[in-house]
Amino acid sequence: MAAPRPIPRRSLTDQVADALVDLIRERGLRSGDALPATADLSESFNVSRPVVREAVAQLAGRGLLVRQQGRESVVTVPGSEHLEQLLRYRIEGSGVSDDVLQDYRETLEAAAARLAARNATEDDLAALRERFAELCAAQGDDALHDADVAFHRAVAVASHNELILLTLDAVASLIRQLRRRAWSGWKAAGKGLQPVLDAHERILDAITRGDEHAAAEAMVSHLAQARAGVAVGAPAAAGERDGS
């Protein structure tokens, strides 16, 4: 019979950090609201002030609090950079494949395109048309790649779903690397930029018409180009033109 595994003991700092999260929820504190003074928290939790400060530092590291010199800590909302750190650690640490990352991208961006077709305002459509014009007019590798990223982000903005935008921003750097590998493979297969521009135009057209199904299908079709490039497996070279 195997020996029972020891139950890990949680530190006092961890317990106070959890208590602080509960306090934030119970009091309905929002972004920008200040926590009670350290002395008051120390008395409420019956712990020393250094323990409270360590718990606050832990929550600041998670993006739940902002510490300010000479002032009480302020509640904040974790941004995409915190989610990016978590996803990057998981993806790189567990060896997530390009295919899995591409599946995730297709699912996320197809949903963004569908919602953009449903929810886009005239301002959103104007922004999308501007991003597409920049994509077509881009000169040089960096400008083209940046314009492509901006177009896809504009689709997410037009979805008016803040969680989609948060998630897309969080994986932006990982997707950027995938784009480079995809474009390298796309070119290695003898294909050019024009089909990629045409695919973006179809996405824009479907969103403009408010056709949710066509928008999602156009996005999936475009990202199939990236998948085809990844499948070729050509190594990305420095200074290559990113267009997928």
Image (spheres, rainbow, N blue to C red):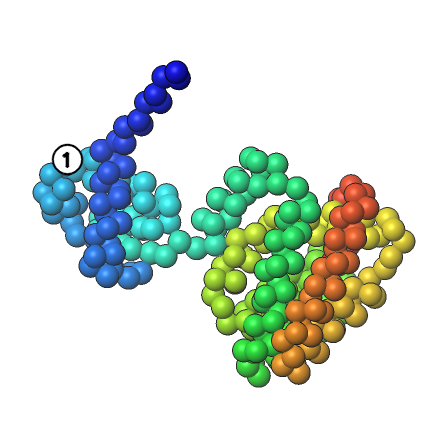
Circle 1 Cα neighbour tier, 10 Å, few/some/many (<14 / 14–19 / ≥20): few
Quarter of image, res 223: bottom right
Question: At label 1, which amino acid type do we have?
Answer: Ser
- Specify whether residue 177 is in view: no
Identify the residue at the far right of this view.
Answer: 190
Residue at the location (61% across, 59% down)?
Answer: 107
Query: In the rendering, at what x and y percent does residue 236 appear?
Result: 76, 44
Query: In the rendering, at what x and y percent does residue 113 appear?
Result: 62, 69
- Is 154 situated left or right of 201 in this image? left
Decide: is 202 above or below 183. Answer: below
Per the image, the residue denoted by label 1 is: 48
Quarter of image, res 76: bottom left
Query: In the rendering, at what x and y percent does residue 72 appear?
Result: 21, 51
Residue at the location (35% across, 22% down)?
Answer: 5
Query: In the rendering, at what x and y percent does residue 73 appear?
Result: 25, 50
- Specify whether residue 91 is in view: yes
